[in-house]
Image (cartoon, rainbow, N blue to C red):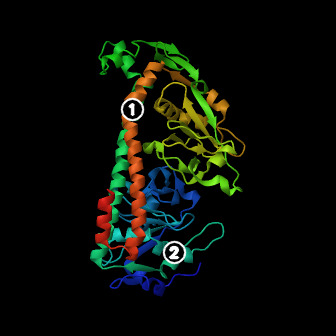
Amino acid sequence: MNPVYADDLVDSVPQGWSVRPFEELVYFQEGPGIRNWQYVEAGIPFVNIRCLVDGRLDRRAMSHVAKDEALGKYRHFLLDVDDYVVSSSGTLGRIATVQRSDLPCMLNTSVIRMRPKTERLDRGYLKYFLLSEYYQAQVLSFATGSAQLNYGPMHLHQMFIVCPPLSEQRAIAHILGTLDDKIELNRRMSETLEAMARALFKSWFVDFDPVRARACGRDPGLPQPLADLFPARLVESELGEIPEGWEVQPFSETVEVLGGGTPKTSVAEYWNGDIPWFSVVDAPGHSDVWVIDTEKKITREGVENSSAQVLPVGTTIISARGTVGRIALVGVRMAMNQSCYGLRGKVGTEGFFNYFVTRQLVATLQQRAHGSVFDTITRDTLAGVPVVVPHSGLIEAFDIHVGPTLDRIRSGLFQSRTLTALRDALLPKLISGELRVKNAEQFIGRAL
């Protein structure tokens, strides 16, 4: 792709807007390039591309460098609150905002820190410009590399930023930020709701709290009909103490195991249909629980001419090859590839109990995965893991009890998907000036 020049941008922006050299308004800095031998178990974490997830930094994906090194020769690479961290290698265009809870952490190579250099540039506007086609097109025009694309500060010195008047910058950032704030609110609500459902599952089926309470003559704090579903005594089993009357069974005996498939990629009629097709890249974060959309979609013809099958809502999907143990609860009818299993609980109408049982077993299944090239969970792996199985009435009661909580999570995901589509549609129009702020406010008001 040919480089994008200032004149290309000037001709496309409204009167009164300017196009300025990127380096004039934006401070940017690339990381130092920490080597594998410098990694330590505990110290100051540093950011890499894998840490940039949905606009946030995922500290779980960070490696560490020794604290003395970080605070010594690398101190100039320590990140600050509200810095933007942008990917500069591999998957270009990822961006995350540094939160106070992320600190301390520092840059490494493959990511670039950015922030406004002058008060003429609004911080929020900078974020959305970095996400815009104006910025992305410049990046792609300069990026080099055959195996993976790369760009860096030397290219940023040659790039430009579209600069509306400051009041317009702030208004654009406010409009788009309002949508992002609602999406973030939904995400936090999902975290809270998922934690509540997970805590209830642990209390009932891992710690056996209601059983222990009844065994000691204490009130389990449940409505009487529900409390009566729990036994009042623990007995010994191969897994230790379990509630009386509950059984220990191989996990595979408690579920129907469904396989997936991939339609022939050479047949165009099998692809780009309206049936979501799940692979591990579509796995949601733990707090989202549900998967409601996928990167790729297939047609009914693709399903009928492959081993793929359409899974009903409430099926638990687990990735079984390569990156094993990623799970999701099917939120809309969808198919999946052959590297996953669909698990349908033999008891329970909604599938919620089965989802949390599977999630509880993930660490064990990962430990037992094997394979010469890729880690693999097989049907024998599922058969080799024992689980505690309560009676069907209690499973049904759990599904009913957590149903409204999990349904709220799913509703939030659908709303966030709509808001994301609206934000993504407005962003290029606002950054280009094609749509002005007043019109955008009216449009959002009608949409919400």
Residue 146 in the image, given as x and y percentages of width and height: 66, 70
Q: Which mark is residue 137?
A: 2
**Residue behind mark 1:** 402
Q: Quadrant of residue 183?
A: bottom left
* Quarter of the image with the N terminus in it: bottom right
Location of residue 132 with respect to 389 vertically, above or below: below
* Residue type at the position of mark 2: Ala
Q: Quadrant of residue 375?
A: top right
Residue 137 in the image, given as x and y percentages of width and height: 51, 74
Q: Which mark is residue 221?
A: none
Residue shown at 67% from the left, 30% from the top: 380
Residue 311 in the image, given as x and y percentages of width and height: 57, 39
Q: Are circles 2 and 1 on residues that touch, CB within 8 Å?
A: no
Q: Secondary structure at mark 1?
A: helix
* Quarter of the image with the C terminus in it: bottom left
Q: Secondary structure at mark 2?
A: helix
Side of 280 where 13 appears, left or right: left
* Residue type at the position of mark 1: Val
Q: Is residue 289 at all visible to an observer of this figure?
A: yes
Few, some or many residues within 10 Å of mark 2 (<14, 14–19, 20+): some
Side of 398 where 16 appears, left or right: left
